Amino acid sequence: MGSVAIPEHEPFMLRPAVVEDVPTLLRFIRALAEYERLLGEVTANEEELRTTLFGVQPRAEVVLAEVGGTPVGFALYFHNYSTFLAKPGLYLEDLFVLPEHRGRGYGKALLIHLARLAVERGCGRFEWSVLDWNEPSIQFYKSLGAVPMSDWSIFRVTGAALERLGAVSGPG
C-alpha cells in the first residue's frame, strides 16, 4: 500500500480490509463509539458491513493498521465531491487505534496514507469531523496541518425524521 514512515521497533503494515475482516471492523467501530461516548448509537452488524463495504456496490473503503499481523487500528473513508473545486474529495469517516497502541505513530501513518491516496486520486480535499470535546485529537490534527472549519455547522437527519423527510411529496 505504499511506504509510510512507521515505528522501526515493531513489524507494522497498512493493508486494505477484506471481507474476512468484518468482525474486527465491527469490534473497532464499537470501541470507537465507546471512546466517543456514542456506543448506544451503534446499530451496525456484520451482515450490514459485509453488504455496504464488500458487496456489489461498496459505499466506503477501509485500511487496517497491523502490528505483527494483528490489527491495531483502522481508517474508513469514502469519496465526496466539491462543486467549487470540480474535484472529488476524500472524507475520513472513522479513524481509530486501540488505546494500548496509541502514541506510536499508527494513527499518523493512516492519515499520511489517506493523504497520499487523496493526492493520487486527484482529490481537492481531505477532510473529517472531530467531536469538539476531543482536544487530544484536535491538537494532533492541527499538528499535521489540518484546520478546523469553524464557520461551518454539520446538519444531520436520521431515523424517523429521515423517513418523514423522504416521504414528503415534491413540488406540484
Image: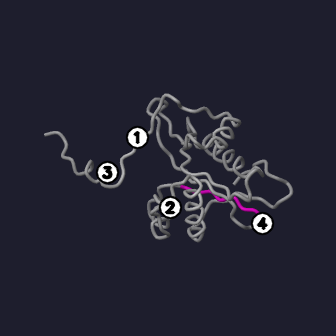
Find the magenta span and give its range.
Answer: 61-67
C-alpha span from label 3 to label 1: 12 Å
Q: Where's residue 117, x and y in %?
A: 63, 46
Mark 4 lies on residue: 68
Q: Nearer the viewer, mark 1 or mark 4?
A: 1
- Check disc 1 and report the residue beneath it: 155
Q: What percent of the width, then of the height, locates residue 113?
A: 68, 48
**What kind of residue is marked 2?**
Leu
* 3D distance between C-alphas at marks 1 and 2: 24 Å
Q: Quadrant of the C terminus?
A: top left
On the image, the x and y values in percent for residue 48 come to 45, 66
Q: Which residue is mark 3?
A: 162
Query: Amino acid under label 4?
Result: Gly
Q: Secondary structure at mark 1?
A: loop
Closer to the camera in the image, 118 or 94: 94
| Mark 4 to mark 3 CA distance (whole Å) | 43 Å
Label number found at residue 53: 2
Sequence order check, earlier mark of 4 and 3: 4
Residue drawn at x 65%, y 59% is 64
Residue type at tag 3: Leu
